[in-house]
Amino acid sequence: MAEFCPKCNYKLKLTDWRPECPKCGVNVMYYGIEDRLREEADKAEYNHAKSQPKYDRLKFSLIGHPLSIVRLVLGLLPIVATLLPMGTVNYVLPYLEKHASVNLISIVMFIVDNGFDVDLILKLLGSDLLGTGMIYWAVSLVCLVLMVVLTLVGFFLLTLSAAKKGIVRNITIPSIGIVLATVSFVFYNLMISELTSALPGIFTGSVNPTAYIVAVLIFVVMIAVNVIYKKKNIQVKYKDVSEFLLPYNERPSTLAKKAASEANEAKA
């Protein structure tokens, strides 16, 4: 309950239970409600006007231009490339023979099925016989994982493509992706060669460069799309909401309505 009447400033008592002010008769609850609603609407429109440019940049970054859509479609394709067969590993032991195709899914499933035994990994990395090959395998795997993580980060950062350094970031990320894919491929080859030499007749393997080539080509196309984007100097199309940054009574549309109303009253 209000303490004073909003119109005449009369101090209300506990006995003044009626909604009307006992002095001036105005409804205390609803007095000036139109002005308060207008103020709230004014604040809402102002906040919308402040956030509209961010929304425009986000929308333009993702679907504001055909090249933006192409860039969005390419965003996750490097990860799809890692699902292709990247090679095979085969090992033959007494009463045990294993043949496996290697890709991102098989690597993840192997880790899930066998657990992540840190002690065993450290022993293998430090082994005189297998250490070098396992180090090559670890480097190849780490580069592959980093490439996947970088691709995911780059995909989400596409939302900031219209920012000041958006194009630079969109070119840098796939460039690093090319380096990581190449290093992973090279060290996978070294691992196969090293383990085949260390375990003759027991371990064999092969490398399928298709997945790596596809991933690198996708990164190259992403770079090319962003370079074209930069060359064309494509600009964000902002929605004009500058009027809503002004107080309601100072907006051109409000002044125009007021002038029209006054003109109609003069004619009447």
Image: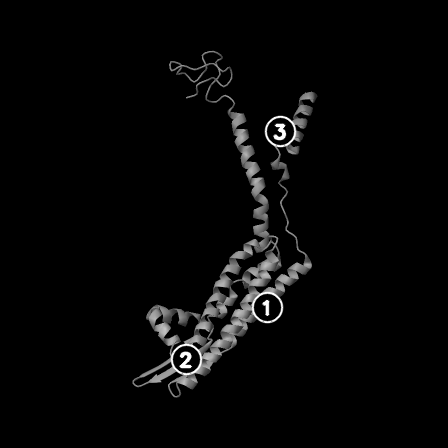
Q: Residue at x 56, y 43 (%)?
A: 51
Q: Mark 2 touching mark 1, by CB under 8 A?
A: no
**Mark 2 burial class by Cα count in 10 Å: few <14, some 14-19, many 20+:** some
**Mark 3 burial class by Cα count in 10 Å: few <14, some 14-19, many 20+:** few
Mark 2 or mark 1: name the one nearer the start of the chain. Answer: 2
Residue 123: x %, y % from top left: 35, 75
Give the SS element for disc 2. Answer: strand
**Mark 1 burial class by Cα count in 10 Å: few <14, some 14-19, many 20+:** some
Which residue ends up furthest to the bottom in the rendered image? 201
Q: CA distance from mark 2 to mark 1?
A: 29 Å
Give the SS element for disc 3. Answer: helix
Q: Amino acid at mark 1?
A: Val
Q: Quadrant of residue 124?
A: bottom left
Residue 223: x %, y % from top left: 60, 65
Q: How many marks?
A: 3
Q: Residue at x 59, y 68 (%)?
A: 220
Q: Residue at x 39, y 69 (%)?
A: 108
Instruction: Give residue 131's mark.
Output: none
The answer to whether residue 205 shows anywhere in this view is: no
Q: Quadrant of the N terminus?
A: top left
Residue that badge 3 annotates: 249
Mark 2 or mark 3: name the one nearer the start of the chain. Answer: 2
Q: Residue at x 35, y 84 (%)?
A: 92
| Of marks 2 and 3, the one in the foreground | 2
Q: On the rendered structure, is 266 left or right of 25?
A: right
Residue that badge 2 annotates: 89
Q: Quadrant of residue 168?
A: bottom right
Compared to residue 168, the image places residue 190 above or below, namely below
Residue that badge 1 annotates: 220
Q: Amino acid at mark 3?
A: Asn
Q: CA distance from mark 3 to mark 1?
A: 54 Å
Compared to residue 149, the image places residue 238 above or below, namely above
